[in-house]
Image (cartoon, rainbow, N blue to C red):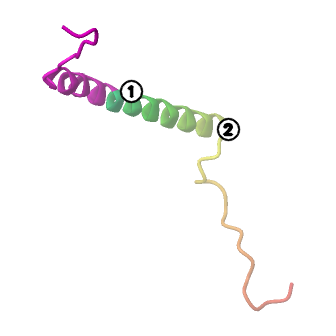
Amino acid sequence: MSGTSVLATDGLSLIATAGFSVPAAVLVAVVVAVVVRDRRLAARERDGLDGSHEPIDEPSAGRDG
């Protein structure tokens, strides 16, 4: 017998690892996105910057003021 050993895997462990890791990563990404969105909305409400009460202030084209 030689002094080297070979590790043989059937690939099922890799599939099982990906089958667990990929959905877990997607779930973490969704939760992070929802938390960030919620904090942005809360900050917008807290600051009163929802835009519903602010008039649109656009410069008139072609007029000298």
Query: How many circles with numbers are drawn on the protein?
Result: 2
In the rendered structure, find residue 60 and report the number of the disc placed on it. none
Give the left or right position of residue 51, taking residue 16 as reference: right
**Residue 9: image location, x then y, percent:** 17, 20
Residue beneath the point at 59% across and 47% down: 50
Residue at the far front: name it: 1
Q: Please check the rendered image and state whether residue 48 is part of the magenta-colored stretch, yes or no.
A: no
**Residue visible at 22% across and 16% down in the picture:** 7
Q: Give the SS element for disc 1.
A: helix
- Give residue 10's position: percent from left, percent from top: 13, 23
Residue type indicated by callout 2: Asp
Mark toward the viewer: 1 or 2:
1
Magenta stretch holds residue 18: yes
User: In the rendered view, would you say 52 is above or below 28?
Assistant: below
Residue assigned mark 1: 28
**Which sits earlier in the primary sequence, circle 1 or circle 2?**
1
Q: Of helix, strand and loop, which one carries label 2?
A: helix
Stretch in magenta? 1-24
Q: Residue furthest right?
A: 65
Relative vertical location of residue 44 with respect to residue 24 in this rendering, above or below: below
**Viewer-closest of 9 and 19:** 9
Q: Amino acid at mark 1?
A: Val
Q: Quadrant of the C terminus?
A: bottom right
Distance, label 1 to label 2, CA atoms, is 29 Å
Q: Please name the residue that numbered disc 2 is placed on.
A: 47
In the picture, residue 15 is in which quadrant?
A: top left
Image coordinates of residue 35 in percent, x first then y, are 48, 29
